[in-house]
Amino acid sequence: MSGVSHPPRLTSASVLRLKREGGLAHFPGLARPRRLDCSRFSEAQRAELQRLLELTVESCRGDAEPEGADWRRLQLSVEDDSGREIWQLRAIEEAVPMALLEWWRRAESE
Amino acid sequence: MTCVAGPQTFLPPYLLERIAGSASPRLRESARRTLYEDTHFRARAAVSTLPPGSTVRGRPARYVHDAQQLRTLPGELVRAEGSADSGDPAVDEAYHGLGDTYRLFWEVFQRHSLDDRGMALVATVHYGENYENAFWDGRQMVFGDGDGELFNRFTIAVDVIAHELSHGVIAYEGALVYSHQSGALNESLADVFGSLAKQYRDRQRAAEADWLIGAGLFTDRVKGRALRSMAEPGNAYDDPLLGRDPQPGHMDDFVETQDDHGGVHINSGIPNRAYQLAAVALGGYAWESVGPIWYDTLIDSRLASDCEFVPFAELTLDNAVRRFGSSSRQAEAVREAWRGVGVLP
Ligand SMILES: [Zn+2]
């Protein structure tokens, strides 16, 4: 996970996609991508999301692929107003702040 | 169910900060924990040095820790080798599950812990809040309490405990690369020894076993029996939230995917079913029939870390011949089992 790039600045037109995968078993229902439409959030919430993405990037920096098995991962991507993916990150869940996992729980399945 | 972490309820951190200073002690505690977590989660590094192992062959050295709903490892030591039941079901299930797994490897395969040199068996329970997973981090096992909505605590199933520990054995022996077919073999071997630990503990014959991995993990709300079925891959669960069990039981249905490290928990259904077919065909106790063949294969120096299904099947067959003879019923059962799942012609 080295070479992780800084997340783009979230605007009201940004869409954040979150996909949780891996773990002791693969559950297709839980692994479906979920989306967060920034247009539906207040400025404070968007700032919060921005902060959480930056925290995740910070936490992933310098981490090698961990040893072991059955880790869960969160795949994050941001799309701009034209629907183009402009940023992506795949992090082990241990590097993801709890609050961002809460956003995942709340996000709508696609 | 707490207010900040349940699937139906959600609060962003700026509200958490408000709650952390609010009236309800329960809400306050929960919010404080989540905030603490997020400012300290860089401290997630696992145990850097393991505690002392066991110098006596035949005796394990168990250490069970309590993470107290945080995500820091290993947490506080709450039960060490030889101490009495703690009264906390997760702690005691982990302790006994480690013992059951140790006993299988020692009594059946004369293996003294994961590395055969008495390595300490370390587990952490109550990991994270509403955490619905268990994993092996390369040195120790980690178990969540489940969310109570879909999942119970992950120590409830001894085969899941043995599955995680077996990843440790596999890392010491085959070191099968954790992606695509070699990863599916890694997962399958963890299920094989997971199921063996349960059958050995319960003295179950192949015909009596349920061949389920993780029975008891789902709450009553889930339409399903377990995480996986070795006898009927693809039929363990079919639930509106979890989806449908994606495991194939035959090469015709092999799943090509980039998800799940190339389907390691998906395509493991195929070698799982081959093992189960051989065990049932031979009858009796699996740890006396097909289990030793799979163990011989795991510790076979010819097992390549990037091994795929066909060479793995051939290696099990070769080990069946070595142990029981070329015209033995064991060798025949193994050959037929791999044919049954479409791996061997
Ligand atoms: Zn596994």
Image (tube, coloured by chain):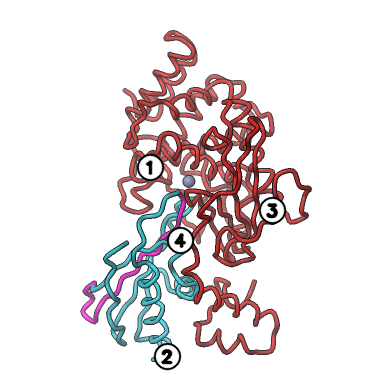
Q: What element carries label 2?
A: helix
Q: Are labels 2 and 1 assigned to the same chain?
A: no
Q: Distance between the residues labelled 3 and 1?
A: 30 Å
Mark 4, residues whose alpha carbon is within 10 Å: few (<14), some, or many (≥20)? Answer: some
Quadrant of residue B110 in the image? top right
Q: In this view, does A86 lie above or below B193?
A: below
Q: Are labels 3 and 4 assigned to the same chain?
A: no
- On residue B183, the disc is 1
Q: Which residue lies under the disc numbered 4?
A: A30
Q: What element carries label 4?
A: helix
Circle 4/circle 2 CB separation < 8 Å: no
- On residue B91, the disc is 3
Q: Are labels 4 and 1 assigned to the same chain?
A: no
Q: Is residue B17 above or below residue A92?
A: below
Q: Which part of the image, by quadrant, shows the N terminus of chain A? A: bottom left
| Image coords of residue A40 (percent x, y) | 39, 86
Q: What residue type is labelled 1?
A: Gly
